[in-house]
Structure formats: C-alpha cells, structure tokens
C-alpha cells in the first residue's frame, strides 16, 4: 500500500437553491434580542421565582455541595466507588425517611 493524492474540483455548497433566496433569507431573518433585553428577561420576577423554588440551598451551600461532589469523585479516581447496598447505616436512613413520608408525592 502506498499514499496517493487525488486533486478534486472545488465544490460550492449552498443550503439554498440560489444566491437570491439566500440573500432574501439573510435579510428577513429575525435578529435575536440584544444582550440587555435577554438579561432583563432572565431576571424577570417570574423566572427568578421559578428558579428559587427549585434551588433549595443558597450560594454557599450550593458551593459546598459541589465541592463535596468533586472531592468524592477525586477520592475514588481510578477505582470503583463502593456500593452501599449492604450498608446498615444507609438502610437505617432509608427506613427513617420512609417512615417520615419523604417519598410521598405532593399531589
């Protein structure tokens, strides 16, 4: 086997059948909101309230949780993490949560 180079003719590929249709689509494409309007939309009361409902911890607790997750991954880097299926403490916590009703739906 040996290396061979074949020169092909240049191909011009357009997603539109003609340049005129491309120009029309380019001109008529709606321009998205500018950064200020997008930021104000993301900071609206409704969006902030929605995010607040699904973020139970504040920034410091979120940061601490994230750091704990990173440390946990680093602790078991290169090996399998232990399976806590037979851990009596984990089972005790599960049964207590079950008795408290932590797994009931809020419907």
Image (tube, grey):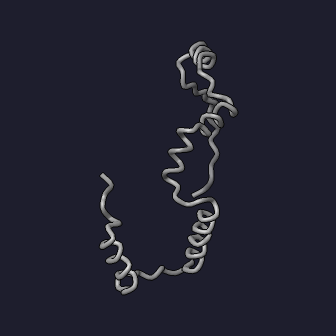
The image quarter containing residue 95 is bottom left
Residue 94 x, y percent position in the rendering: 35, 76
- In this view, the residue in front, 24 or 13, is 24
For the image, the number of numbered tags is 0
Residue 42 x, y percent position in the rendering: 60, 39
Vertical order, 77 against 60 (above or below): below
Quadrant in the picture for the N terminus: bottom right
The image quarter containing residue 35 is top right
- In this view, the residue in front, 78 or 41, is 41
Residue 51 x, y percent position in the rendering: 53, 48
The image quarter containing residue 40 is top right
Q: Is residue 105 left or right of residue 61?
A: left
Residue at the image position 41 percent from the left and 81 percent from the top: 83
Residue at the image position 62 percent from the left and 41 percent from the top: 6
- In this view, the residue in front, 15 or 39, is 39
Residue at the image position 56 percent from the left and 44 percent from the top: 48
Residue at the image position 35 percent from the left and 82 percent from the top: 92
- In this view, the residue in front, 27 or 67, is 67
Residue 78 x, y percent position in the rendering: 55, 79
Q: Residue furthest front?
A: 100
Vertical order, 5 against 98 (above or below): above
Vertical order, 59 against 100 (above or below): above
């Amino acid at each position: 086997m040996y290396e061979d180079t074949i020169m092909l003719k240049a191909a011009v590929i357009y997603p539109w059948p003609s340049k005129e249709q491309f120009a029309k689509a380019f001109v008529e494409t709606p321009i998205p909101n500018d950064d200020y309007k997008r930021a104000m939309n993301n900071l609206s009361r409704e969006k902030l309230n929605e995010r607040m409902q699904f973020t139970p911890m504040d920034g410091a607790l979120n940061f601490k949780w994230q750091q704990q997750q990173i440390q946990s991954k680093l602790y078991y880097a290169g090996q399998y993490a232990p399976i806590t299926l037979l851990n009596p403490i984990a089972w005790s916590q599960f049964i207590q949560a079950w008795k408290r009703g932590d797994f009931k739906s809020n419907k």
